[in-house]
Image: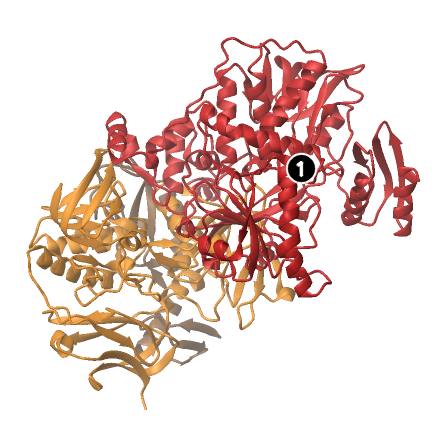
Chain colours: A orange, B red, C brown
Amino acid sequence: METDVAIIGGGPAGLAAAMEAKKHAKVTLIERNEELGGILQQCIHHGFGNFIFGEALTGPEYAEHFIEQMEGVDVMLNTTVLEIDKNKRMLLSSPDGVFEMEAKAIILAMGCRERTRTQIFIPGTRPAGIYTAGTAQRLINIEGVMLGKHIVILGSGDVGLIMARRLTLEGAKVEGVYEIMPKPGGLTRNIVQCLYDFDIPLHLSHTIVEIVGKRRVEGVFVAKVDENFKPIEETKRFVPCDTLILAVGLIPENELTKKIGIELDDITAGPVVDEGMETSIEGIFACGNVVHVHDLVDDVSFSAIIAGREAAKYANGRKIKRRKIKVKAGENVRYVVPQIINGRDIEEITFYFRVKKEMKNVVTRLLVDGEVRKEKRELIVKPPEMVRLKVKGELVKNANSISIEVKKVA
Amino acid sequence: MKVEKKVEKYARKKGWKVKARLEDGILYLEGEVPSYKEYVEIGRYAGKQKNIEGVVNRLKYKGKKEVKRKKGENKLIGEADVVIIGGGVTGCMIARELSKYKLDIILVEKAEDVACGATKANNAMVHTGIGEKMGTLKQKLCVEGHKMYEELSKQLDFPYEKNGMWIILTKDSFADMPIPSFLGNFIARFIIPRIILRRAKKLGIPMHIVKRKELLKEEPNVTSRALIAVYSPTYGVTSPYLFTIALAENAIDNGVKIMLETEVVDMITEGEEVKEVVTDKGRIKARYVINAAGVYADMVAEMAGAREYTIHPKKGSTLLFDKDYGNYIKHSMTILKFPRMEHYKGGGAMLTFERNIQLGPTLMEVEDREDTSVTAAEIKQIFSRFSLLLPNLPRKGVIAYFAGLRAATFTEDFIIRRAKKVRNFIHVAGIQSPGLAAAPAVAKMVVGLLKESGLEMVEKKDFNPYRKASVVIRELSVEERQKMVEKDARYGKVVCRCEDVTEGEIVDAIHGKIGARNIDAIKRRTRAGMGRCQGSFCLPHVAKILSRETGIPLEEIKKNGNGSNLFIGKAKCLLEEENGN
Amino acid sequence: MRKFICIQCPLGCEIIVEGERIEGNKCPRGKEYVMQEMKNPRRVLTTTVFIENAIHPMLPVRSNGEIPKELLKECMKILAGVKVKAPVKKGDVIYKNILNTGIDIIASRSMERK
């Protein structure tokens, strides 16, 4: 089988990329689940699309906008990509058969997986009743089961906060949200509307030091941590519960990416991409959470549209010169995406980045060849909230050195 | 000095009130000690004495829990020539071996699946016997059992491979001994390997010395502090639960009846015989009883009036690494560290059949026979011990950890013999490492004991030694895979992304001869949920398939046995509760 | 004395209300937000209801406006007993004028008949 643009993953990234790419090329959208929408179908809460639609939609509503646009796209559901090679050949498996597909361009849009209990070495037993937040969300919102009655949540990122509210609304008692950092990990809006609204206690600088229960969770031991995040033995106490939800981080799902030998960024755990979302292998693009974990799905859609457009161009034989200029993460910047500027013809480029520490009254800056070429003031920047700097493509197209920095306003 | 006096003197010196009584080779301990720690210490001391066949430790200590006898069900549910108690690798191996004869056999297992005790929680090594104490029964049976694996794996279609083992000595091997390091290194390089080879020659196990340079060339990730190694090319690795399931399926094929979720709670005896085995599901008339009850073997023996030993569980925890590190080492390896702990081979970095590295196991005496927790201390211990072997193996490679309980007796050897006071009761107790490797030989020994006991054992002419495993899709070629999907579309739907497991295989696992009835049973048979995401993605899908195929409502699906319900009900059940519904 | 965190912008000002005094807001929107929160806090409700004959047993739904915060629990109990049948179109009214708020509960997505 052949196609122009093969997109792996039918979630928000894949959908937006397909919507754009289909305008210029033949598109095949490959999705392992029985329906499109990816993670959005289980994100039944609202807050999606403030930027792109001007409304606070629910996940399924947001997804449906794009799913309605799939006319003309060859959608393959229940299909998993088993293998992929540098020559853009894939091996697919679905109930309809096992077959090879060759594409002119590929867009990786596989999203993320969740960090597990064992990856953070929580000691204790391995009973039923331990769920990562995403799995819990799927079970409640899609499969229609209730997980437990007395819940403890580890991790104050958005997924954990959303689940704290969801479980409470469904009648459970959330005993508390425990967070190892001294500051919460999710958006302030969610701290207020998910925890404060329901009087759910947030315990910062705390972690879980043991899980108890032979067949089913019976409780957890929690403890305060010191400045090195080591548990303080004297603060250890038992919290009875029957369910433990882990919201301890998302990991971009790059197993296929690694197999082809695409260059990965150590900090984002995703592929290094240029302003057209192309990876280190020509003709293979990436967008969405597989590149780096986003806070807002709007940003996913924007970058996916760029990936779709550029992938279609590549499939149609458009050649570009690749200048391979690295974008440096300057002062107080932990990482920037895109990591490379190749000098494409793109009118507007958005640099997405995260800061190392919280700062108030700052200016975010683009430096090109040592000079400040774009600036934006921000009242506050925090690590959990991704920052954007939109610049005109021509500013960086022929640059020899590029960096993004965040400085305090004098 | 008589044994009893010796043991009592030892206790008295420590300030403990212990009375010892020797009867027919069994040493009975009574009295009181301060805690479980001392209970084990004196038990082991007693077990070390010469010519002791078993230690029955009835010492009281602070916090000792009373064993509550459970209630049995009265109705008669079966009748057999041989009842085997315990469905681990030992019990299932015995069942399969006995199914070669014209006998009615019933195997009872209290868990919801076979292989649920130590069988599923060990590091899968099929030891050659080199690491066991010389002259013990466990060593003898290990050497014999190891030799039978090749043939068995062909007959029963389960994974087995001779992937080899390095026994490595490094500059840290004698670091904990009160001798200067140059002496320690000398002993490590020149004395220990020769001792090992001599022992290997005696046991008929092929092994050879490999010098440091060659070792590091073959295994570049091993510590540069390595001095020398002894390599064992015939060391094997298997999948203990797939092996056990294969045994059980073949046994069933050959007429054995396996009753799961059937717990032995008592026995009805008459004179010197067990007449019936009483379980929580009903009574089974038995002519002979084989006690392969693992960590509960002593309690089962007690029910028959044949208590000749006490089990003290020894927990072993293991860390499991991502398959991404599958090429980090080529062969399994262990580091010899002195002083050596008795009856503990030390664990190591062992490669599973699927190429996950396992670090461990640890060894920790525990009181609770259900304690399979992995403690922070054990995790720390594993990293510190095995970083001496593989210093750069990163912590972030760990995807899972688990623990199992070794069913050790105080004499620290297998107890496989006829009961002294009950003529139709056979002990197969104290099966700790190398229980897995020894299993085939253990079964042969049990056959001998049954014959000795007077059971007529006539070989079946129609015994079928062959059993085929259900298809493993990821092992097929693309063409073979395509053919399977054409046959059944469910083999095309990938459910577990991490391990490449399809819906068809999950359905096969549910409908097998020993069908999977819960999530963990499916996991062991198919590997769904064993990958790096540990079921985060596939759990909802696996649960749905299980519900669909068995008719068990989704909200009642369990992770493993009773009490391990994944959910508390359907969505809204707590709101309906509040509504008064 | 009541504490609020304003959610009108990423600054998240901590605003303290003591009697008539409102302090801590860096802009007037903060004062508006807090006053609304004290007088009549309202929230969008998102949840699921049972659905038959569809790809999943649950249909995601949302309120088409904000509901008084203190009524959320009661709304959840009412919706727990609701069962709809596929097909459903995104935006379909699943429950009209819940608890007399004038707000409807509508479908968040379309679900075809399986």
A198 vs B483, left or right, is right
**Identity of the residue drawn at 78% across and 29% down:** B308
B556 and B103: which is toward the camera: B103
Crowding at mark 1 (Cα within 10 Å: few <14, some 14-19, many 20+): many
Question: Is residue C45 among the parts visible in the rendering?
Answer: yes
**Identity of the residue drawn at 20% across and 38% down:** A99
Q: Quadrant of residue C78?
A: top left
Residue C34 locus on image (x, y percent): 37, 72
A9 and B438: which is toward the camera: B438
Q: Which residue matches tag 1? A: B407
Up/down of C41 relative to A72, above or below: below
Residue B556 locus on image (x, y percent): 46, 34
**Identity of the residue drawn at 43% across and 47% down:** B534
B180 vs B218, left or right, is right
Q: Quadrant of residue A185?
A: bottom left
Three-letter code for the amino acid on which mark 1 is drawn: Ala
**Identity of the residue drawn at 58% across and 65% down:** A231
Q: Quadrant of residue B44?
A: top right
Up/down of A383 relative to A99, above or below: below
A148 and A311: which is toward the camera: A311
Residue C11 locus on image (x, y percent): 35, 76
Q: Secondary structure at mark 1?
A: loop
Dividing the image into 4 quarters, which one contains the N terminus of chain B? top right
Residue A55 locus on image (x, y percent): 22, 61
Question: Is residue C83 among the parts visible in the rendering?
Answer: no
